[in-house]
Image: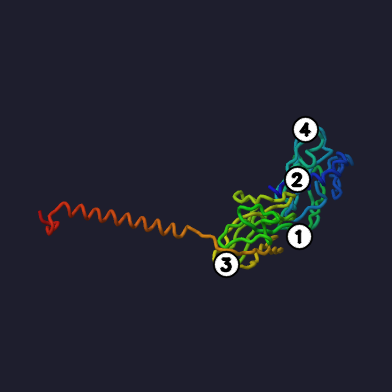
Amino acid sequence: MFRTAARAVAVAGLALPLLAAGPGTAARDGGAPAPGASPAGPHLAFDWDKVEVGGWAGVAITGMPPGWDAVTVTSPALTAPVRLTPKKAGARESRRFPASEGQDVRGDIAPGSYPVTATRDGHTVASARLTVTPQAPALITRFVAGPKSGNLGGADATPRVTVRPGSEIVVLLADHSPAPAEDTLTVRSTAFEAPMTISTDDEDDDPGCKCDDGATVYTGHTTVRDDLPAGSYPITVVSHEGNHTSTARLRVGGKPLAHHGSWLTAGAAALALTGVLALVLRHLLRRRRGRPDGVSAGCR
């Protein structure tokens, strides 16, 4: 949800200059109108002049003739076609920014300039070019961990806070420039029993102070090993398809937290065994009371 919010803010901010240009104005990197079209004819425009590989492109069309119902926008840069319809009955333009329908830019293409074509009833009505740029580098603003009951604020997160061995912790990473479609990340540390996962749709962990400033937030929880000596332990996460590494330090100290699971399990097993033995003994006693001493079970 944080990625969606950031995208909406960016679209709204970048859309204002295009809105001011008015209907019939193509984006700055737009191509020539279709053959035979007048200068005021159909034009394609994008909500960004440039989009990243694997990013998102919003598109609109203006200058359509009266009575048009829909156009289909296609491009080798897009993962699927975009269908545009009139903004309202009789309008010559489709929905404009930021409400225009958009589509994902493919993540497996090279940066460059790609053609975009709008067709209606099998005929090309407008064309343009979309500039695709390399993915932006990571912009990590926070990579912290702290007690599951804390809020991951300054005083309740690494490196200021010290957690006890055996305690549950929440790990949080905030990235203002996340890689497209990277919704989960793996965090590793010698302080953990095994690698843990943090994700953008984690509903179990509320980190409290998330500092919702448009960044994409990844969270998750794990348990610190209960046999750790006091010390500082690195926690590491690799993002952006292996191209960015973030590291923080987790301070561990104090008396290990008692875990009751093992002795509770053992106690439950012992109680069950005791119950079985009691039933067996009671059965044997009943059989003995039902016959004289020294008489075998086969004699009457």
* Label 3 – label 2 distance at C-alpha: 45 Å
Q: Position of residue 30 (x, y in %)?
A: 84, 48
Real-space Cα separation, disc 3 to disc 4, in angstroms = 65 Å
Residue 283 vs residue 14, the one in the foreground: 283
Q: Decide: marks 3, 2 in contact (CB < 8 A)?
A: no
Q: Nearer the viewer, residue 241 or 195?
A: 195
Taking the image as shown, residue 270 lies to the left or right of residue 299, namely right
The kind of secondary structure element at disc 1 is loop
Q: Secondary structure at mark 4?
A: loop
Q: Residues within 10 Å of mark 3 (few under 14, many from 20)?
A: some
Mark 4 Cα within 10 Å, few/some/many (few <14, many 20+)?
few
User: What is the C-alpha distance between the residues marked 4 and 1?
Assistant: 40 Å
Is tag 3's residue or tag 4's residue first in the polypeptide sequence? 4
Q: Callout 4, which amino acid?
A: Lys
Q: CA distance from mark 4 to mark 2?
A: 23 Å
Q: Which residue is mark 4?
A: 88
Q: Earlier in the sequence, mark 4 or mark 1?
A: 4
Picture residue at 71% right of the left edge, 50% below the top: 3
Give me the residue at 83% from left, 41% from top: 42
Residue situated in front as seen by the camera: 66 or 220 = 220
Mark 4 and mark 2 lie on one chain; the one further toward the N terminus is 2
* Tag nearer the camera, 4 or 2: 2
Q: What is the residue that sits farthest to the top in this orientation?
A: 89
Taking the spot 61% from the left edge, 51% from the top edge, the residue there is: 205
User: Could you say which quadrant of the image residue 100 lies in?
Assistant: top right
Residue at 79 percent across and 32 percent down: it is 67
Query: Mark 2 highlights which residue?
Result: 8
Badge number at residue 228: 3
Query: Which residue corresponds to mark 1?
Result: 137
Q: Are marks 3 and 1 in contact (CB under 8 Å)?
A: no
Front label number (3 vs 2)? 3
